[in-house]
Amino acid sequence: MKYSLILFAGCFTIIGCQSKSSKVTNNLDHPAAYVYDPHSYAQPNKAVVKHLNLELEVSFEKEQLSGIATWEIQTASGADTIIFDTHHLIIDKVLSGSSDEPIKFLLGPYNEILGQPLYIPLNRDVSSIRIYYHTTPESAALQWLKPEQTAGKKHPFLYTQSQAILARSWVPVQDSPGIRFTYQARVKTPRGYLALMSARNPQKINPNGIYQFEQSKPIPAYLLALSVGVLEFKKLGERCGVYAEPELLNQAAFELEDVEKMLIAAEKLYGPYVWERYDVLVLPPAFPFGGMENPMLTFATPTILAGDKSLISLIAHEMAHSWSGNLVTNATWNDFWLNEGFTVYFERRIMESLYGKEYADMLAVLGHQDLINTIEQLKNSDKWQDTRLKLTLDGHDPDDGVSDIAYEKGYALLVSLEKRVGRKRWDTFLNRWFTEHAFTSVTTEQFIEFVHKHLFRKGSDWDKKSHFHEWVYEPGLPANYQPPTSVRLDSTVAEALAFLKGKPATALAVKNWTSHEWQYFLRQIKEQLSAYQMAELDQAFHFTTTGNSEIAVLWFEAAILHHYTPAYPAIEAFLKQVGRRKFLVPLYTAMIKSTDWQNRVKELYHHARKNYHAVSRKTIDELLQI
């Protein structure tokens, strides 16, 4: 959206709010790092934020944050305006940081995806500004949970989810992954609650309800995070620990007891961990994702608490983001695969280091299945172009571009590079990538240039044969894609076929199977089962009551497909409690197609919807055409 405005005559002028210049030719730091971002109103080539001092007061009664955002800013010569992103925020007033002088401001036209630009005029003496504001019920990053939506059932809970462009709904900010800043914060909560952020954190509740935070490393806005609840902390190692509601703390600590080992393994692969601590906050089940890689404090879903540590690869994934994402960040959401493809690769290297190659191979094959399913779903749709690694999301919510493509196709590209040059040389290359681009935001084109410079020359034999362009800029899978294999998962196929041909469930050779083998087994047979066979499996393995969410969702899909009514109450209970979008989409999709559920799926969703974060609600609203 381009437009010209002349505001507050004699005060300041704004012309062309979205310049497409990819480079900056002024005195700002690292000018080449600033790339046009279609999902932000900010013009960092003219005025950019450098440090945030945030004061927040948390009101559970009003379900509102009241804040003062004091921004230290840097301007180019002649810049007379700074532009912030906001979405459903009420801006009360703006003051000059140095003189307390009120500054006139303007909120531009509202856009459903981007929100509203906040224009603040500058003069040569202004190096900081204070924005007084408060959130609204439509501030989509915030989820305010009632006591009954928590594990303890006694106290309310708050958490934020800022990725991709929701930070602007709880802080007025330049909400682009290409803009980094440090921050300090002071958060006031009701007494008896613990506040946590993506920063240095307390480990005990402060009786006065006042908490101080500092993040000394520059981060993009999507890594701003806040959570407030009745929480306790348990140490897991010298640099690692877990926060959770008291009712979940011991279970979470058991499940995550290998986190320090993961961190050591990660450092051996790709260099020192620079974020001081790596702690995990286990959130209530409404959280829409498996995890969120907020620096120093990963937010995690309780659905990883399977009781046998079988789902902790998710923690390895979020930890890997400390390098690929938090340290070296995609410059725009069109380059999202640079965050996620690298992280999936790194995650599997961590798991291989700790649990062996066979374990990592199982993860890769399950990921391959997800990738193939996504490509098949999108093949004949208007989203076929979204199967490219380099996306074009201008005019779209960047959340719409999130799929297995960025994760698994990105992973496959990196594996293909590793195979071509050998692991030793590849690891040296990745270490160099992380070191030379630390605390910067990068584009796909920068990565390709780096590959050509340090691995292969452009036009070389590898470049021609591997079809780099086909991997990155073309939809679907390239001709030289090689599916991963797993000896352990291959052995489950024989048992799946045997069961379908009549072998009793109790006679299946399943001793010592991991969660991954059970997932693969169910994926092989779920389309072909009869209700009788489902009953037999359930009696033998108790799938309807499993505590493993990954297995449960596959089983519930089969139950919906094959009208296995004994699982229906468990399905309803699961959907009313769990808000993880990865699980909601396949179950609601199956219900839409089922004669048993078609007439009541919207009623079920009506009751469950209040338990979901706005990210999940948006997806399911669209799926059910609500």
Image (cartoon, grey):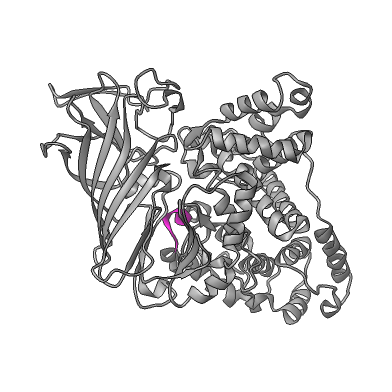
Total numbered circles: 0
In which quadrant of the rendered view does residue 335 lie?
top right
From this view, report whether residue 25 is shown above or below residue 558. Answer: above
Q: Which residue: 29% across, 60% down?
A: 211
Asked whether 420 or 613 is in front, the reply is: 420
Residue 39 screen position, x and y as percent: 42, 35
Up-down relation of residue 592 to residue 431 (above or below): below
Q: Is residue 217 visible?
A: yes
Outermost residue on the front side: it is 238
- Side of 525 where 84 appears, left or right: left
Relative horizontal placement of residue 36, taking residue 49 as reference (left or right): right
Image quadrant occupied by the N terminus: top left
Q: Is residue 331 visible?
A: no
Task: From the viewer's side, name the closer residue of 489 and 596.
Answer: 489
Q: Position of residue 431 (x, y in %)?
A: 62, 38
Name above or below for residue 275 compared with residue 519.
above
Magenta includes 615?
Answer: yes
Principal SS element in the magenta part?
Answer: helix
Seen from this angle, which residue lies furthest bottom?
Answer: 539
Nearest the eye: 247 or 216: 216
Q: In which quarter of the image is residue 548?
A: bottom right
Q: What stretch is highlighted in magenta?
A: 612-618
Q: Does the magenta portion include 304?
A: no
Q: How far across and down, in percent of the image, does residue 377 sit? A: 66, 46
